[in-house]
Amino acid sequence: MLSATMLYCYAAYAALQQDTVHQEETPRVGLGISLVPYVFPNNDTYPVQPAGVMSWYIPVQIGRYFRWETEFSYAQTGDSLLFNLNNNSVPARHYRVTTYAHLGMGVYYTHPLEEHTRLYGGVRSGIVSASVQWETFLLDRVMTQPFLYAENIGSFWIGGVIGFEYSITRHVAFGAEAHITSYATGAVSSRSPLPADYPARFPAGRTSDVILTSARIALRVFM
């Protein structure tokens, strides 16, 4: 009787182990989201990567050690400025809307430290687009429509990431990441010439690389 019980327990344990191995080997697809609370340095004059942006992920965990991921971010902020035009002779109010979007892919090596914790690192790359839309109203003057201007810039980017995550359950993981990203910036384009006395967000003719570092917190949910 004892031998039969031991044999049954061993068979159940072996089946559980085989099922666990099968689960680890089967690719797992999920959905993730991360927040960029910090960007170092604060490069406000060139908002290729503003702070506070939410990024969405589609992670695919392949076995225990590899992960492929797509990511997408979109953010839009607005502000209002008062300054004078035409050599400080004409006061005006300016409404400015900055839009930022990026798309990318990444490949990561994930290394389990213990049952619930893993380290990971990898490379990612993609494209980014940023634009500024201006609406300008001259003060103390009747205007049927504002003056409209636009600045636009696109860029290719490539970077690295290192982080760790803790698996709350088999399907939910929470972690923190450090990123370094190089932006190969392109030339500024515009639908209309931006007046010289406007505070341009994108320096004209900028083509040099921009390297930014940032920190993120991330939540991933696997199916």
Image (spheres, rainbow, N blue to C red):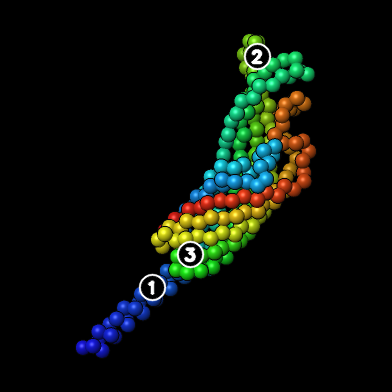
Name the foreground residue: 222 vs 121: 121
Residue in the foreground of this view, choosing between 1 and 143: 1
How packed mark 3 is, by other alpha carbons closer than 10 Å (few <14, some 14-19, many 20 or more), is some
Mark 2 Cα shell of 10 Å, populated few (<14), some (14-19), many (≥20) = few
Judging by the rendered image, the residue that carries numbered circle 3 is 117
Q: Amino acid at mark 3?
A: Thr
The answer to whether 179 appears left or right of 29 in the picture is right
**Residue type at tag 2:** Leu
Which is nearer the N-term, disc 1 or disc 2? 1
- In the picture, residue 105 is in which quadrant? bottom right
- Residue drawn where x is 77% and y is 26% of the image: 196
Q: Is label 1 or label 3 in front?
A: 3
- State the image coordinates of residue 140 (x, y, percent, origin top left): 65, 10
**Which numbered tag is attached to residue 139?**
2
Q: Tell me if residue 13 comes above or below residue 27 in the rendering.
A: below
* Residue 48 in the image, given as x and y percentages of width and height: 66, 42
Q: Nearer the viewer, residue 215 or 139?
A: 215
Q: Secondary structure at mark 3?
A: strand
Q: Residue furthest left?
A: 1
Tell me which numbered mark, 1 or 3, is placed earlier along the sequence.
1
Which of the two discs, 2 and 3, labels the residue nearer the N terminus?
3
Task: From this view, report whether residue 12 is shown above or below residue 30.
Answer: below
- Residue type, numbered disc 1: Asp
Name the residue carrying label 1.
19
